[in-house]
Image (cartoon, grey):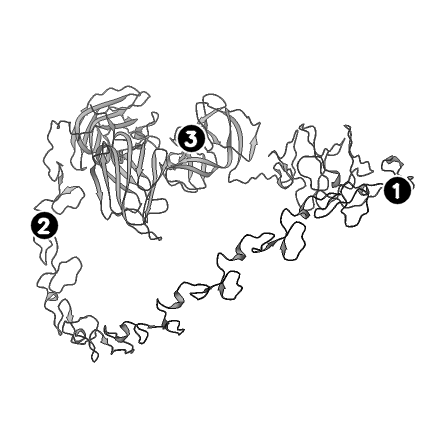
Amino acid sequence: MEPLIRISHPTLLPVQSATSSGNLEWKGAELVSYSEERDLPGLAFICLDFGKSISFNSIEILPFQDGSEFFPETFRFDLSQDNVAWEPALQESHYKRNPKGIAKWSFSLIEARYLKFVSKISRKANNGKAKLQIGALRVLVEGIKEIKVSSEADRLSTKENLLDGRPDYGWISLKKDNPEEEFLIFDMGSIQRLTELRLQSQAISPTLFPESMIFLTSEDDLTWHLLHEENMFLSEPAQWYRWKFPPLNFRYLKILLPAANKAIQSSFVGIELYSRQTHKEDQRPLAEPVPYASVLRSGVTRLALDGEVKDGIALQSSDRRLRDATTEYKGSVELASDGEDKPLVVVQGNDKRLKVATELTSGLVRLARSGEAKSGLAVQSDDERLKTATTEQLGIVELAEDGETRPGVAVQGHDARLKKATKKSYGLVRLAEPLEEHPDRVVTGDDPRLRDATVTQKGILRLAMNGEESALAAVQGDDKRLKKATTELAGIVTMAKSGETKEGLVVQSNDKRLQMATSEGPGIVQFALPGSGMEKRAVEANDPRLNDSRNPLPHEHEYAPKTHDFNSHTGLLKMEGSVSSELKGIVPPPHTDSIIYSRNNAPGSGVVGLGGARGVVGFSEGTGILGVSKSKERTEAGVFGLSSGAPGGHFVSQSDYAVFANGMGVSSREWNGSGKALYALGETLVEGFLRISKESQEECIARSFKIDQRDAISAGDLLVTTDEPGVLAKSKFQYATNVVGICIPNPSLVLGKESKSLDHVLVALFGVVKLRVDAGPGSILPGDLLVSGLTSGHLIKADPAKLKVGSLVARALEPCKRDKGMILALLTSG
């Protein structure tokens, strides 16, 4: 038996693979867009493979994200089970999209494994190429299009709950003082086949499931047929009940609940409709034949009433629109009166406008007299302007005399200017004599100036003899001046011998003057012996005369020993100089970076400053005091401030912030930072404004929470409480009231201690964040209120009529008009 196909719920069918002649863009198992460009028009195709045979009753094509300018006009859909034999299914020519831009086709359930989209690609883009673009190509079971009910108990018990798949909410009729008849009508949007109906009862008692029910079907919402009837039906909580039928055609299903029900309210939690394929070659025909068509009941088709205009019905031969047309009554058309100028009427054969045209009276046109130049007139074949043209009189043109250059005349074929040109007479040009230099004359192919050049005679130019230095002569490739140069023979240059100083010679790379210099032999220079005062000798770096050889003198003298007791100095010590070296990385500064350099090899201090008011003062156009430490302990620091009463450090700036805690480092100095800017141990007091900002659109306050390990949670997910205290999970229900916040990787402010464990995440509680939304239930625009949706971890646009206390999560700051995505939103509560 063929498997059941649920036709009541909208279902997008996933595509396993696809091939095409252009470029495809995928998102999961859905084809998002297709585009193709070609130099020449032709056929484009997309072939979708669903991996197995599927059943569907709707196809949608969305416009391309950049617009619908290159949406196709002529295309076809083909079906196949084996990718070998193809069956044409839908064909469109000069297709016009609806105002929403979505192309959609609905039909009875069909079965295929492969679906091919074949289209003409002919519309030209600005670059001159043929171009085609479409958005998502979707194949789906369309589901119920519309539900009508007689009443609803409240905003939580609506008809939409019948298709949401949740067992906790359903449809409940309005509570009344006495039992009254209720009804539910389901519209499929197109003719489908029904084989099974299922209804679900509530999980509570009493279930309010009706005791009496009448099921009816219709194809046109005019004529209804009894399908089944139930009386004294007993129901249990949270149960599905089903009714099977022989396959039948229907578009509308009505469930009638008579007033015979004792309950003053009725309820269904869910409804499901099923079908089976009925068009396979090996399937037996139905037991009941298809009924004859009439104006009230469909057979193969439904017949139209006289003059009725409606899609999907057949016109009868007695219809008044098929009668003979007259000027008073319409048939297929309406005839026009003689000379009548009216839209949508047909001109008759005896109309005066169809009579023979003359020069005096009009027919379809009025004829012009010979030579008459007036708008709206037709030129006759005997008009003088159509006669043969000569040099004396005009026809269509006037012919020119031989050689005549007057404007407005046409040159004849035997004109002298069109004859073959020679050196004596003109044709189109005049040929030049050999070697003749004359303007307006053309050089012939035998001119000597076009022959090969030699050293004795010119062609286009003259070749120079070997070694010849002459103006206007071209040097040949075998010229001696182009040969390889040596010390004996010249080429482009002449090479010098080693040590040779003759003018015009080029020094070779092995010349002795280019060898390494020593004190025994010269190179470019010759070194002097250590301490030697020889002329024209270079002093080497190890010469003793370059060492500091001053003699030690008493301390009172202008000079003092290099090493002496610092305590021997009295008074003030003042030093001035100019030294500098760039300090990069966390390394000890070099002694050339400071006028005073002190190094203590013991664990003590390098410099100690004691003063009545200030111990050490640093003043600079750049950094006043630089402290560098290689310790990894927090008890040590680059600069350490210690006080017994006052603050350990006091910082003042006349134009910027007093303290700049740079966690990123200074790249130009190779001072790399850890990314951590400030660590405060103990109580922190801030008197004044506190601003927390970062280079991001997200600015929020967060706290660390433990998460349910069964959920795969990522940034932007909506999290709710669970039965386990302190543990959060993804939201999975609409309008949830146990919402906590949004999972976020980098908040602006973290409350409490942040856990580094893998089972903890940071959750934004307030502020502006990026969160996940689903625009399937409705497009989201800036300013819309957001609540939890059925898609795990996603939010949807809130329906004000369905809002509950505590269900409001956020307000959208960015749009999401279709599908799922991440948008910026302001977290709120309520």
Q: From mark 2 to mark 3, how far is it between C-alphas? A: 61 Å
Residue 121 seen by the camera: no
Q: Residue furthest front?
A: 488
Q: What residue type is labelled 3?
A: Gly
- Specify few, some or many for label 1: CA neighbours under 10 Å numbering under 14, 14-19, or 20 or more: few
Q: Which of marks 1 and 2 is in front?
A: 1
Which residue was labeled with disc 3? 793
Q: What residue type is labelled 2?
A: Leu
Judged left or right of residue 49, residue 298 is: left
Is the C-beta separation of discs 2 and 3 under 8 Å?
A: no
**Disc marking residue 559:** 1
User: Dot 2 corresponds to which residue?
Assistant: 322
As helix, strand or loop, the secondary structure at mark 1 comes to loop
Task: Give amino acid for label 1.
Answer: Tyr
Describe the element under mark 2 as helix, strand or loop: helix
Return the x and y of residue 479 as percentages of the image width and height: 51, 58
* Crowd class of label 3 (few under 14; some 14 to 19; many from 20; radius 10 Å): many
x and y, in percent, of residue 112 in the image: 23, 32
Instruction: Say whether residue 356 is left or right of residue 88.
Output: left
Q: In which quarter of the image is residue 18?
A: top left
Picture coordinates of residue 601, whole percent (x, y): 77, 30
Where does the image place residue 732, in percent across and percent down from the top left?
40, 28
